[in-house]
Image (spheres, grey):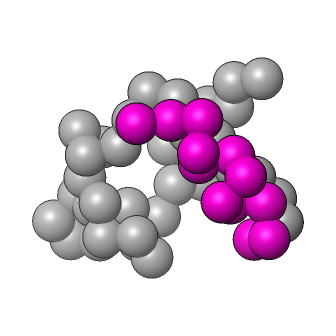
Amino acid sequence: MSTIIPESELVLNNDGSIYHLHLLPEELAETIILVGDQNRVAEVSKHFD
């Protein structure tokens, strides 16, 4: 599932970074996996480099 946030809904800092993350768009991956439950992080992350 892909979600695109409309520009009108995306809060940016003065430097163009995403508000609470302080990341610029080029610093984000094209695909982001959210595990939901923090207790599943180790289980899911062991499948990636």
**Which residue is at a point 59% across and 48% down the rendered structure image?**
45
Taking 2 as reference, is 47 above or below it?
A: below
Residue 3 included in the magenta stretch of the image = no
- What residue do we see at 35% from left, 43% from top? 28
Q: Quadrant of residue 39?
A: bottom right
Residue 9 location in percent, x, y? 60, 53
Nearer to us in this view, 13 or 44:
44
Residue 24 higher or lower than 32, as above or below: below
Residue 40 occupies quadrant: bottom right
Residue 41 highlighted magenta (yes or no): yes
Farthest residue in the bottom direction?
A: 20
- Answer above or below: position of 46 versus 49: below
Residue 43 location (% of width, % of height): 73, 52
Residue 14 vs 7, above or below: the answer is below
Q: Which region shows up in magenta?
A: 38-49
Where is residue 29? Give x, y as percent: 39, 35
The answer to whether 46 appears left or right of 44 in the picture is left
Farthest left residue in view: 15
Q: Residue at x 50, y 35 (%)?
A: 48
| Quarter location, residue 13 | bottom left
Q: What residue appears at the point 38 percent right and 62 percent down from the top-left corner?
A: 18
The answer to whether any part of residue 23 appears in the image is yes
**Magenta segment, prevailing SS (helix, strand or loop):** helix
State the image coordinates of residue 36 (x, y, percent, origin top left). Answer: 82, 59
